[in-house]
Image (cartoon, rainbow, N blue to C red):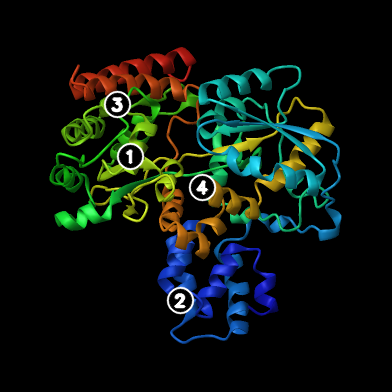
Amino acid sequence: MDQQAAQSGHDPVALAIADVMDGRISRRQFVKRATILGLSGGAIGAVLAACGSSSSSPSAAASKAASVAPSVAPSVAASVAPSAAAFNPMAFAGSTVKVVLVDGERDEAGLKARIPEIKEKMGITVELTTLALGALLESNNQNLRAPQSAFDIMHVLGFSVAGTVGAGLFSEVGPWIADPTRTPADYDLGDFPKGVLNYCGFFDVATGEFGGPKQYLVPGIHSGSCLLFYRDDMLTAAGVAVPKNWEEYLAAAKKLTTADVAGNCMIGANDVSLFLVDWYTRFITMGGKLTSGNKNTKTLSTNFTSPESLRALQHMIDCVPYAPKAVTSYGFTEGLDAFATGKVAMMLFWTTIGGSIYNPVTSKVAAKTKVALMPADSGQTPRAIRGGWGLGIPKNLPAANQGAAWQLMTYITSAEFNKFQFSTAQTDPNRTSTFLDPTLGAAYPYLPQAGEATASAQILEIANIPQTFEIVGAAAREFNLALTGTQDAKTACQKAQDASLAILKKAGWLA
């Protein structure tokens, strides 16, 4: 790439445009990359029209990219124009930064491996703690409301943002990102997909909604959504096409079931992921809308008794006979193990957990597995729930602690570290450049599709209230009982609705 293209290389939109214009990638590859970057259909069309039918020289391509990119999608990091010499990586040498991350999702792997390098490059000592999900959420709540937090950097689940960031308990990081003395020159905020930033980055405290003008978190250490994982060899041998809708999925599960292999699997236990992965995916791709009304006018209500809710749960019930016998006690660990050991043909799964299926050291089916976007009804976008975490700095820390914590955060949320973390632990990336890295994509062929799933993912409609898990847990309990045959789908959906309305009324979101 020539000098002008190189200068625009920090903007992933401009880089993608330059690549397609000078022929380094095809139009189809550009569309896939542009989708991950969050460009609208109209913007993509405008770029393709500007390409014309003839090839361009690299210099001409860069010129066109420079003129097209600003009108298509200005980089979020446009305001950051620091001098490389202004950032001092040793500014907080001698400091100790205490980090708490969730346990069991491999997020700590990259950081553990890099602790000596961090000490060498920044002079910062890292003290790392991992806690199980429930314990982490409780620890965060206690520390954020204490006179001073015991942790300097906290792992913040997207579903807990409303109750913590929304309560004004985290420091705003936007001004630090724009400060060349605090943030490295190559720290590109525009490399984070827009949906990821809006979920685990920006939050409007005044309205209690995701997005908004102020940034409190940086996405990390993993993002992600869900994909359909399937055994390509089994589908091919059985003459079964990859399911595009839910009727095809059920038919495929039935045909793929043998004495040794279950045609499909699900998270069937009394577990929040039963709701988040299996039920919610079916529900939204069948046209369901989880809420109506508005929390700020005390009219927020759930729609668990809607036809789409009933149909989604009944579809899961219908899939149980073609799943492992103990599926109603399966969390995601049991489902992952069953698939990785060759006992399951298809499953809907968190991509950040399912990525380990492609590790030949731990999986017997690494070379036989492919992925696809979710089945969906005609007219519905194949999509699943938006997952992921952010990293934040508590407001109740002394200024020196905050400064050292941010210095470390610029490292562990950088593009370079994101690639290292993925290659180490296969947790879903947070950065577009990692999703599109050709070397990583060759080793882990599901990665570009994981990026597509992240781009199209949908934020859970009740994620903007602190009672998210209370409602999800109540519904998951009833849905689990339906899967075990204790009650029918209609009864389970009614009980879920009754429980959720009671929670909303108690919290003051429903009069």
Which residue is tagged 1?
Answer: 281
Residue 42 placed where, x, y %? Answer: 44, 64
Q: Foreground residue, 227 or 158? A: 227
Which numbered disc covers residue 135?
A: none
Q: Badge 1 local density, few (<14 within 10 Å), some, or many (20+)?
A: many
Residue 223 placed where, x, y %? Answer: 51, 43
How far separated are the C-alphas under marks 3 and 1?
Answer: 14 Å
* Nearest to N terminus: mark 2 or mark 1: 2
The three-letter amino acid code for the residue at tag 4 is Gly
Q: Badge 2 local density, few (<14 within 10 Å), some, or many (20+)?
A: few
How far separated are the C-alphas under marks 2 and 4?
Answer: 26 Å
Location of residue 154 by image quarter: top right
- Which label sits in the foreground, 2 or 1? 1
How far separated are the C-alphas under marks 2 and 1?
Answer: 35 Å
Which residue is tagged 4?
Answer: 195
Which residue is tagged 2?
Answer: 49
Which residue is tagged 3?
Answer: 304
Q: Is residue 511 visible?
A: no
